[in-house]
Image (tube, rainbow, N blue to C red):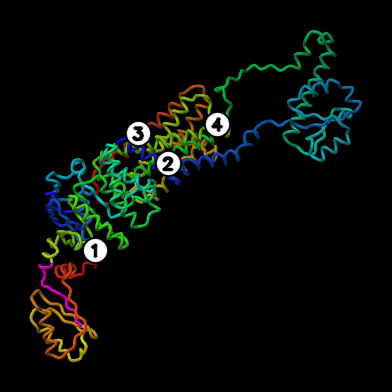
Amino acid sequence: MFLFNYRYRLKCIFKDRQMMFWTFLFPILLAILFNLAFSNLSSSDNFLKVNVAVVENAELDQNPAFTEALDGADDLFVVKYTTRAEADALLADNQIDGYIVFDPALNLVVNQSGLNQTIIRGFLDDFVQSSATITTIITANHAALHNGIIAGITSRSEYLKAVSASQSSPDSVVNYFYALIAMTCLYGGFLGVKEVVAIQADLSDVGARINLAPTNKLTVFLSSILAAATVQLLELIMLLAFLIGVLGISFGNQIGYIALTCVVGSLTGVTFGTCLGSIIKKGEGLKIGILIGSTMIMSFLAGMMSADIKYIVMTKAPILGYLNPANLITDSFYALYYYNTHTQFFTDILLLCGFTLFFSSVTYFVLRRQKYASL
Amino acid sequence: MVINVKNLVKRYGDLIALDHFNLAVQEGEILGLLGPNGSGKTTAINCILSLLKYDKGTIEIYDQPMSPEAYDIKRQIGVVMQNVAVFNELTVYENIDYFCGLYVSDKQTRKKLVAEAIDFVGLNDFTKFYPKKLSGGLLRRLNIACGIAHKPRLIILDEPTVAVDPQSRNNILEGILKLNRQGATIIYTSHYMEEVEQICSRIAIMDKGKIIAMGTNEDLKKMIKSGEHINLELLNPEHLDLSAIKALPHIISAELTDHQLVVKSSRGKNNLIMILDHLKDQNIGIGKIYSEPPTLNDVFLEITGKELRD
């Protein structure tokens, strides 16, 4: 009976086009939209070099140290050597952030103030200060030129060592996709509602027919739930494959733990639906409405629409984060992606197991009833 | 005894849906539960099937107490619900196979039973159709097939012909008679008295959660005073003395509308001849004449004071 019902329930779920759209295609469409919207978000954090022009004249030729220093800062600047007239034209067209000219002193010409102009200014100040220091030292002690003191002035030493908590770099964008997976897990609730409705005599006519049969209701229900969880897990795996293979989202390389998160997340989502479906006695439309509403709120708080919300929740009301299955699923994936240890991951997984147990228990206590007060 | 229900009481708050309901069903009969909407037919069926909780009373099926866990009893029962109860995602064949599979685990046996059920309801050309593609009549037939595919000894049909076209209705009624001939005991609930009269060997009339009369079609009609309804077309009704007609023996009522005289007589012999003789004596010409026996509606009307379809 268990396998017989399992096979037919799989068939019913796969042939339910509306259900397949919301639980499978909709998350993929959202992922594509997220990818389009966030594709430039990470790159916008990258440093863009400052465009600067240097006026070629006789004074510049007399300061080869400056040209050498500028060439050494090629990670900061894109340098164009040109005439003053052309430099003025480039500045007017905003093709450069400023130009440097020896006139005869070292001057910076800009037409607005901003970060890039401050960077050029900083470089020039550093050069002028170093030059003045070297000049002073050589004037006072000419031997310094030969015993390495001058080299010491131009070098910078780091006395603190930064140790990363991860082999991965922090990435706020992946969190949006992890929250999307969390939403997909909770959308498994649609399947849970469908299975509860199909088995309860007071919720559907087929439920009444199943209750009339000489079969153990809980056996039928467990196999139905297993079918729902199977479909949900398959959908989740396909979504992951799409995110990794097509959109290039990183999940780290801990496949076993990722699979564990998917299994637990799927069970949490499906049992969330069975719980809602069994305790809400009104029509299926209301059940679905409440399911969508609550899933959206949980996903929002988990940072699906704005990463700042997740940060605010975790700093102002962390308990909300721990009571939100969507946040726990999101955190599980992020912990696998970012942290080298598994403390956070296992905390999240245990809490998710707790939620699954709670949802299952509520469902069981409602479903174990064999007779109905009204149909 | 197939079903034995004693003193069944079911309340919905202050409303008494079943009021000390008693029912005994014998092996091999077709028992009709007839009553207006809201009389308690479906509630009684759902209580008998252990779907609904009840407040008081006992229910035995095949001499065993009925309960949700009485799987041996359930295995022998087939139910055709009032509403079509099938999965829209499964084909005709798959639906029948699924519901039959809840009773029969052996695959080969089930295959044979499903084929027989499809043949029985005449859905051979529609096995790969999904329910949404079926007409109302075909859908009802699928509903029946899902309920009877496992060859139950006791079949309960709860208003299976609601919203069905006349042709499909006849097919369904013929099918029920065929099932009965094959040995099944049948309980058939309906508010269509013609159907009940047509197929049931015994009829229980329900009102307000109680059985108010029970017996064969003929037994029930004998319980009431009303006899036949005599309709006469009068050629010269202006000469008729209606009070004289009413004064004749066994006449309950007489009404004249234009040329149409309708006389209700009580049970008795030769009422029609007596009326014809009287009209002849009065020199009243007669056109068409026809006489109707009393209906179950008359039975219901006389017992409750209201029409069956009120």
Secondary structure under tag 4 reads helix
Residue located beneath label 3 in the image: A357
Of residues A287 and B193, the one drawn nearer to the viewer in this rendering? B193
Question: Spatial distance from mark 2 to mark 1, Cα to Cα?
Answer: 41 Å
Q: Label 3 amino acid?
A: Leu
Secondary structure under tag 1 reads loop
Residue B192 numbered mark, or none: 1
Residue located beneath label 4 in the image: A244
Which numbered disc, 3 or 2, marks the residue closer to the eye? 2
Q: Which segment did they paint magenta?
A: B221-232
Of residues A269 and A326, the one drawn nearer to the viewer in this rendering? A269
Question: Spatial distance from mark 1 to mark 4, Cα to Cα?
Answer: 64 Å
- Give the chain of mark 4: A
Would residue A356 appear left or right of B47 to someone viewing this image?
Answer: right
Q: Does mark 3 fall on the same chain as mark 1?
A: no
Residue located beneath label 2 in the image: A14
Q: Is the residue marked by circle 3 packed among few (<14), some (14-19), or many (20+) residues within 10 Å?
A: some
